[in-house]
């Protein structure tokens, strides 16, 4: 499991670096999944090499054992024919092949453990990748939803604090202008009425002032 732990630590480190760099989460998840898939490909290649090495060792071991049996038979045949020196040489060769076979058997045990461990790691990584793909789809959906919500909030902020406020300010300014114009018009009307009243009353200052006051207070003429 040491190899897988290292792979996942590297993947997590890459994930954190990319997040800190404010990169697109969707691209990040796609890259992380692709990296895991590349790791799986390398692990499968390692398993294939290990299996091929194990098969080669098995063939070599089998061949050494066959040769050992062959020289044993030759030693027996030499003895039957009374050739003890040849039988001894054959047994020496047999012993050499037996030692080779024994060494290969030791290697095979180690290779079998290695192959089994690599296969276990490969199956674990395949499961992790399946889970990662499922999580990737979920996280991508969440990232897209978050991005859409962010854009919506930005639009609402612009609407609430931008264009509508400007429109409201313009309307308020137009209403203020209209009110000022109405007030000026009323003052102009009052001034005109006062002039006519003064003319009719013989331009008496008191009468003029009284008429102006009545007009401003909107009181009926006496």
Image (cartoon, rainbow, N blue to C red):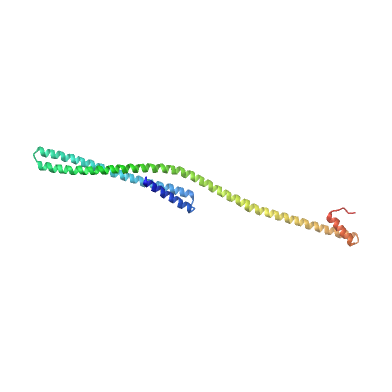
Residue 113 place in picture, x, y as percent: 31, 42
Q: Which picture quadrant has residue 93?
A: top left
Residue 69 place in picture, x, y as percent: 18, 39
Q: Is residue 199 above or below residue 160?
A: below
Q: Nearer the viewer, residue 88 or 184?
A: 88
Q: Which picture quadrant has residue 172?
A: bottom right
Residue 56 shows in this picture: no
Q: Residue furthest left?
A: 82
Residue 5 shows in this picture: yes
Where, quadrant-wise, is the N terminus in this rendering?
Answer: top left
Where, quadrant-wise, is the C terminus in this rendering?
Answer: bottom right
| Horizontal arrangement in the rendering, residue 187 relative to residue 108 (left or right) | right
- Residue for point 65% across, 53% down: 165
Q: Nearer the viewer, residue 169 or 132?
A: 132
| Horizontal arrangement in the rendering, residue 130 relative to residue 78 (left or right) | right
Q: Residue furthest top?
A: 80
């Amino acid at each position: 499991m040491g190899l897988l732990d290292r792979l996942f630590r590297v993947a997590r480190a890459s994930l954190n670096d990319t997040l800190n760099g404010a990169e697109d989460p969707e691209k990040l998840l796609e890259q992380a999944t692709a990296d895991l898939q590349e790791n799986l490909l390398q692990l499968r290649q390692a398993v294939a090499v290990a299996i091929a090495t194990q098969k080669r060792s098995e063939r070599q071991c089998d061949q050494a054992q066959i040769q050992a049996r062959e020289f044993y038979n030759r030693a027996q045949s030499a003895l039957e024919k009374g050739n003890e020196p040849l039988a001894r040489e054959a047994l020496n060769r047999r012993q050499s092949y037996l030692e080779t076979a024994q060494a290969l058997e030791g290697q095979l045990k180690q290779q079998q453990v290695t192959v089994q461990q690599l296969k276990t790691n490969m199956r674990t990584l395949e499961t992790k990748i399946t889970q990662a793909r499922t999580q990737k789809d979920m996280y991508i959906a969440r990232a897209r939803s978050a991005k859409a919500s962010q854009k919506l909030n930005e639009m609402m902020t612009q609407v609430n604090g931008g264009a509508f406020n400007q429109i409201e300010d313009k309307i308020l300014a137009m209403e203020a202008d209209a009110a000022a114009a109405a007030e000026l018009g009323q003052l102009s009307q009052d001034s005109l009425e006062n002039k006519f009243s003064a003319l009719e009353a013989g331009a008496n200052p008191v009468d003029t002032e009284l008429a102006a006051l009545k007009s401003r207070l909107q009181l009926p003429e006496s």
